[in-house]
Image (spheres, grey):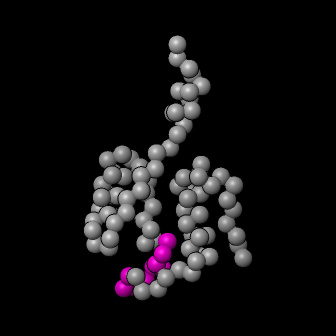
């Protein structure tokens, strides 16, 4: 007998894949390839650690600002992760 409650619960689970590695070890390339192959969205940690500068990687976000930027991205891309998050306007 099929337990439809279990099937429903399993069908609503989200898979998360964490890809880590040293700088220059092609982790971003691998993550983009996995995302493309699986139609998944991804978040790049550099986007939350470093401010956009030219040249890149010159100025870090502060810890509080980094947290807000990361939670905002999670809310936008993975709404089920932080459903009640509202970014502060102050």
Does the segment drawn in magenta span residue 51?
Answer: yes
Does the segment drawn in magenta span residue 22?
Answer: no
Q: Position of residue 36 (x, y in %)?
A: 33, 51
Q: Residue at x 54, y 52 (%)?
A: 78
Q: Residue at x 46, y 45 (%)?
A: 15
Task: From this view, report whether residue 80 is shown above or below residue 69.
Answer: above
Classify the position of the C terminus by image quarter: bottom right
Depth check, front residue: 58 or 20: 20
Q: Which residues are magenta?
A: 48-56
Q: Furthest-right residue in view?
A: 90
> Does residue 38 appear left or right of residue 52 in this picture?
left
> Does residue 48 appear left or right of residue 75 in this picture?
left
Dominant secondary structure of the magenta stretch? loop
Q: Position of residue 24 (x, y in %)?
A: 28, 72
Q: Position of residue 63 (x, y in %)?
A: 58, 77
Task: From this view, report whether residue 9 is shown above or below residue 30.
Answer: above
Q: Furthest-top residue in view?
A: 1
Q: Position of residue 76 (x, y in %)?
A: 56, 57
Depth check, front residue: 72 or 17: 17
Q: Residue at x 70, y 70 (%)?
A: 88
Task: From this view, report whether residue 55 is shown above or below residue 27.
Answer: below
Task: From this view, report whether residue 88 is shown above or below residue 43.
Answer: below
Answer with the quarter of the image where residue 73 lies: bottom right
């Amino acid at each position: 007998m099929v337990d439809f409650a279990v099937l429903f619960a399993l069908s609503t689970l989200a898979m998360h894949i964490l890809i880590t590695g040293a700088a220059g070890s092609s982790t971003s390339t691998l993550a983009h390839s996995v995302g493309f192959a699986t139609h998944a969205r991804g978040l790049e940690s550099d986007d939350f650690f470093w401010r956009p500068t030219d040249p890149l990687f010159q100025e870090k976000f502060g810890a509080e600002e980094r947290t807000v930027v990361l939670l905002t991205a999670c809310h936008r891309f993975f709404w089920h992760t932080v459903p009640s998050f509202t970014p502060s306007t102050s």
